[in-house]
Image: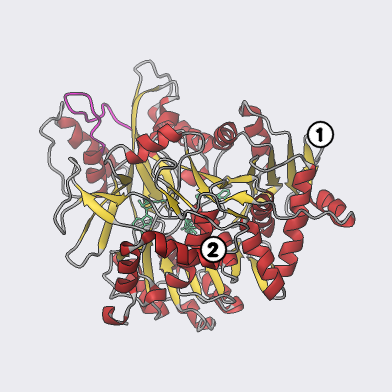
Amino acid sequence: MSSTQSRYHEVYARWKSDPVGFWREAAREIDWIKPAGTVFNPQSGAYGRWFEGAECNTCYNAVDRHAATRGDQAAIVYDSPVTQSKRSITYAELQDEVATLAAVLQDMGVTKGDRVIIYMPMIPEAAFAMLACARIGAIHSVVFGGFAAKELATRIDDAKPKIILSASCGIEGAKVVPYKPLLDEAIQLASTKPDACLIYQRPQLECSRIEGRDLDWAKETARAKAAGEKAECVPVAATDPLYVLYTSGTTGKPKGVVRDNGGHMVALKWSMSNFFGVKPGEVFWAASDVGWVVGHSYIVYAPLLHGCTAILYEGKPVGTPDAGAYWRVISDHGAVTLFTAPTAFRAIKKEDSKAELLGKYDISSLRALFLAGERADPDTVKWAEDILRVPVIDHWWQTETGWPVVGNPLGLGALPVKHGSPTVPLPGYTVEVLDEGGKPVPPGAMGSIVIKLPLPPGALPTLWQADERFKESYLSAYPGYYNTSDAGYIDEDGYVWVMGRTDDIINVAGHRLSTGGMEEVLASHPAVAECAVIGVKDALKGEVPCGFVVLKSSAQQSAAEIEKELVGLVREKIGPVAAFKLAITVPRLPKTRSGKILRGTMKKIADGDQWSMPATIDDPLILDEIGDVLKSRGVVG
Ligand code: COA
Ligand code: AMP
């Protein structure tokens, strides 16, 4: 479809001329217990609040209202090649499961406003848990399974959960990952202790004992079912938090992104038809994990709010069992969309470069592929277009925004694609590019990508119990704007090009990680005098971390031994998801005369990009030495 046939420009202009009216109209798609008198209060919160005064319940909108009208339709389809099982849960069954689990949570003393940590693998019970919290007004905080005990402990100490929901194990490709020992260690490390834990036993690896602080999920839900216990939906304020999702900040202390109830529902519901172009009743698949924002928004909440069938896939794009896994899922369930990270397509291409396995499956239901989580490199996008022959839609957003900021709005009629650009800002977002002094740059010039305040419904109002940190991190650099910490440019046609982060966050296989956090871990090793971690280009994962360490002269072990320990230490403290496999000893770190480590130049050298000697460098020779070390370790790209 050409841009003249797209309704995008008209809809964007309508939003721009009357944002409050636009979101008031979008809010009609939601069932409110008490509608908002004021759609937007600019005086409230850090930059204003949406739907203040309204009352609602997210679980009611995602589950109960569909149970009444489409009760027999599948709400969630669980597809798990790693356990060779599938399960379809209708909206009526989902209501039953969620209301029962919510009653169990109430029996455990959970009430409105309490936090509940969910540390679970990709099983339907993880979604039940999120919805059960939403039902009773408890605030969930899902922690990704690939994080280590220490990361979980940090989140426990920040969220101070009343209880924790977990499972005996996760299944990662061919590996069974025991969760319970990680949970126990995290609780031991944390200063805040939950009152209780509810543990879901998986047959692949059961915990030997569930006692004392721990309760057995199956027994508790069976007891509640037998007693006919079901929790009703509890009215909450639209501005009450639905969840807190921790994401990497610039230090080892993650940021607790707060999502409210009302604005979140309005924005997600709007995005399903207008951005993704999906209708209620259709099968929507986001191949991510409930531990990430994509999982929150597009595995659980948005498809259910829209009355779709959501696929919950416990598997990988390759190896479970092969590079045809995604095509099998689309064909088995009739998915109309697939949403994943570009890295998944790079993984498939690496194994099956001609996509021969595609020939085994009928994927005619698929209307579009959506890519996000990291920059969609043009080669991957073109390859996906060639093999799938459907629109491939790159879209850019962040944990903080909760839904796409820039994208090609398929639902409004797609605009012409420019490979490498996620296309245009969606209604709700005025995206600008500013220079270091906060002045707008001309089209095509690089700068910091910012969003004019107020942020739209669905985006974070603040960080969990850290209003000042929220303002400092996002609102202080450019007054009147939200700083995305992404750099890029906007071209003459208004297309946004997102080129990379301006802070120390890196994207590893679509997973957001802080190099600052990894540096804190390396620096804690007794033999390390100084360190720097950068993200280096990787053909599969986009970027992988690479740590440079200067050892203390007093270090007793060999450099190779220490490097091995450092790799183990990051895995132990942050988790396997960090994919930290490269620690390299160097004699000195390159610094400016004022002592600032030249991470940017090191990255260029490692990536094999053009670089020039910084004028302020203290010791020019060290960069050549680093180049030589990187070459000898096979890192230079
Ligand atoms: N629980 C425990 N461990 C986990 C985990 C989980 N939920 N998720 C990942 N890990 C582990 C992996 O097993 C791996 O461990 P290893 O070092 O022992 O091999 C490590 O964390 C890194 O995982 P991952 O980044 O997934 O790399 P991979 O090499 O296992 O797989 C891809 C590479 C590209 C196949 C994979 O990253 C992928 O499917 N990406 C799809 C994109 C995606 O889901 N993005 C999320 C945001 S949209
Ligand atoms: P997360 O909060 O984990 O979703 O990560 C958000 C970050 O991922 C963004 O700030 C970007 O740096 C990066 N990102 C996500 N989607 C895209 C995209 N489509 N293009 C470029 N970068 C992206």
What distance separates the C-alpha of mark 2 from that of mark 1?
37 Å
| Location of residue 481 in the rendering, given as x and y in whole percent from the top left corner | 30, 46
Residue at label 2?
Answer: 302
Q: Which residue is mark 1?
A: 212
Camera-side residue: 121 or 60? 60
- Residue 418, numbered label: none
Segment tinted magenta in the rendering: 585-599
60 falls in the magenta region? no
Q: Element under label 2?
A: helix
* Residue under the point 61% across and 61% down: 314
Is residue 283 among what the camera can see? yes
Residue 175 seen by the camera: no
Q: Position of residue 516 (x, y in %)?
A: 38, 34
| Residue 242 position in % (x across, y down) | 58, 49
**Does mark 1 have its CB less than 8 Å from ligand 1?**
no
Q: Where the N terminus falls, by quadrant? A: bottom left
Relative height, residue 31 to residue 105 (above, below): below
Observer-nearest of 233 and 310: 233
